[in-house]
Every structure is written in C-alpha cells, then in structure tokens.
Amino acid sequence: MHITVKGLLQIKKAILAFFKVCDSKLTIMVVPHSQGKVVNFQTNIFALVFGVILILGIASSFLYFNNKMVASNSEIAKLKEENRKTLASLDELRDDNNNLIQTAKRFETTLSQSLSLLGININTSNSSSSTLNNGDLSSLFDHNDNVSGTLQESADIKQLTAYLESAVQPIEEISKLIENQGTLFSDIPSVWPIKGGIGHVSMAFGQNLHPITGQWYLHKGMDFSTYRQGDPVIATANGQVVTVSYDASFGNNIIIKHKHGIYTRYAHLSTIRVKKGQFVSQNDIIGTIGNTGVSTGPHLHYEVHIGSDVVDPAKYVTMKMAK
C-alpha cells in the first residue's frame, strides 16, 4: 500500500488540528453565592481530560482496594471462627486423651494382677525400649511435666500404643490358657444335665429316705426335676455312649464314657435319642425327662462314676446349682 505525498500532508494536518484543539485554552470561573471574590483559572482541554482520567483512576483504585479490604476482613473473621472451633475440638481431644490415660491406668493394674495370678509376666523388651520402663505404664503416667500442648498428647498416645502392643502376647497366652481350660471342662461332666439350666435338685447325693419304702438308703446320684415330662436331657461332657438300655430300677437309661476314667448315667428317661457306640459332645441332647423304672414322678436320676467309685455329682455340676 502506497501513501502519496498528498496523503501524508492530510495526516499531518489532522494531527496538528488535534493538538491545536487539545491546546485550546479554557477559563474556569468559580462564582460564590456570597459577595466573595470570583476565582478563575485557565487550562487547556488536554490537561482537563488528563485530570478527569486521573481522578477516575484514583476513585476506581479506592473502590477496588476497599472491596479487597472488606473481603480480607471477612476471611479473617472466618478464620477466627474456624480457629475457635479447632481450639474447642482440641480441648475435647485433650479431655478424651486424659480419660484414655485414666482407663489405661486401670487396665494396667487389672492386667498386672490377672497375669500375676496366672504366673504370666509381661515382656516388653521387644517394644520401644525408650517408651516404657519395667514393662508397665510407669513412664506414661510419670511423663515430663515440662512437655505441654499437642506434643504431650502425642507422646502419651505413642507410649500407650507401645504398651498395648507389648500386652498383646500375654493376652494371647491368657486366651490359649482359657482355650485349654475350655477343652478340659468339655471333657469332664461340668454342666447342668437339663438343657437351658432349668429345673431343681429334688434329691441330693448321699443318705436319704427312699420315696417308696420310706427306709434310709444311700442315694448314689442326684435327682433333677422340672415337674413335667419331656424336657431335654444333655450330655454333661464329651464322650461315647457305652450303654443304652431299659432297667427295672432305672427305666430307660444311658451311660456315657468320658476321658480320665469318668462315666455318667442318665436314668428314668422318657425317650432316648442316641445309640450305643455314638460319640456325643457336651450339651448334645441325648434324651428327655421321664417317669420310667422305679420312680414316683417325672425326673432325671444323674450319676457320676470315676472308675469303680460313685462320686457326688454336685462337685462337677455347674455352679448354677449353688445359686
């Protein structure tokens, strides 16, 4: 695109005309309502326009920064409220931590006493060596009073965690001991022979008056009664059924052989639900209460034999009988 000399001259004239207009003089007069002196000053269009732009810029900047200050104040107020809530939560956390420490004290005392009775010692040599002393919570409960704030809570929780980790092994040993004891008790006649622990002892072991002859005799077992017929009778220990028979005296009766040379007899049954040679578990239903044989009413005659000796079943029956 080519610009001619004539075009350049026109552009030059336009620029000169623009500056001439901008340089035009203006007189601004300020006339007061009173009889005061009239104030006037001269300027040009360029200076007037620049002044207006400057004033508008200053006003815009003021409004912008004022809005920013309002937003900042709102954000500060919001942060203060969040900080207040955080401090309240921290106070609650500290209270919970103190409660946890108190509970841990009781746990430590109870566990130590229980382990002492069982002959088990806590071994904490494999846990954090610097967190606990002598395998207990002493270092936790005697913590440095100079430590404060969240650092103290954090240190307490770490020490408590280390202690609980060290307590896992002795608790597992207790579980194994209880499991072994549970196996032992399931192999000896240690439960109430009527399902659900119902009924009562109608005649104890030992010297008693015979309900039919009225004569003193040695009662070689215990009689249990629920005042009705048909309540389920259970095996009082794991074992094998060695006798299922009817006897003129005992009526329908069952003999079960258990470990350690122990036998149990269940007599006067209404029904029998096991067979000779069958293995049964403790609490399995083997029959129901009846009135068969020499009997004056529905009841269970229950005997415990160790080898050839007849023993008092009360020594083996669950403590429910003593309540």
Image (cartoon, rainbow, N blue to C red):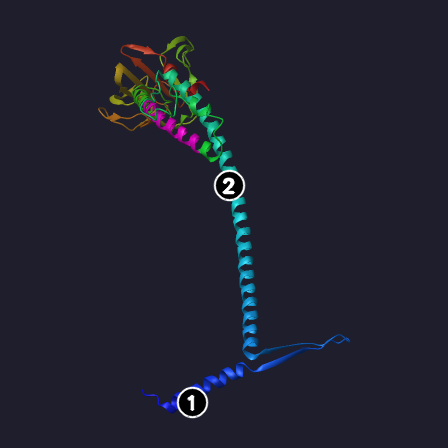
Identify which residue is drawn at 53% across, 51% down. Answer: 76
Q: Which residue is at the front of the view, 116 or 55? A: 55
Within 10 Å of disc 1 (Cα), the crowding (few <14, some 14-19, many 20+) is few
| Amino acid type, mark 1 | Gln
Residue linked to disc 2: 89
Q: Position of residue 171 (x, y in %)?
A: 35, 24
| Amino acid type, mark 2 | Ser
Q: Is residue 308 above or below residue 277?
A: above
Number of numbered discs: 2
Residue linked to disc 1: 10
Quadrant in the picture for residue 175: top left
Q: Position of residue 238 (x, y in %)?
A: 28, 23
Q: Is residue 56 magenta?
A: no
Q: Is residue 1 above or below residue 242?
A: below
Labels 1 and 2: the sequence-earlier one? 1
Residue 104 visible (yes or no):
yes
Q: Is residue 188 left or right of residue 133?
A: left
Q: Which residue is at the front of the view, 116 or 315? A: 116
Identify which residue is drawn at 45% across, 33% down. Answer: 151
Magenta residues span: 154-174
What secondary structure is found at the residue carrying circle 1? Answer: helix
Q: Is residue 165 magenta?
A: yes
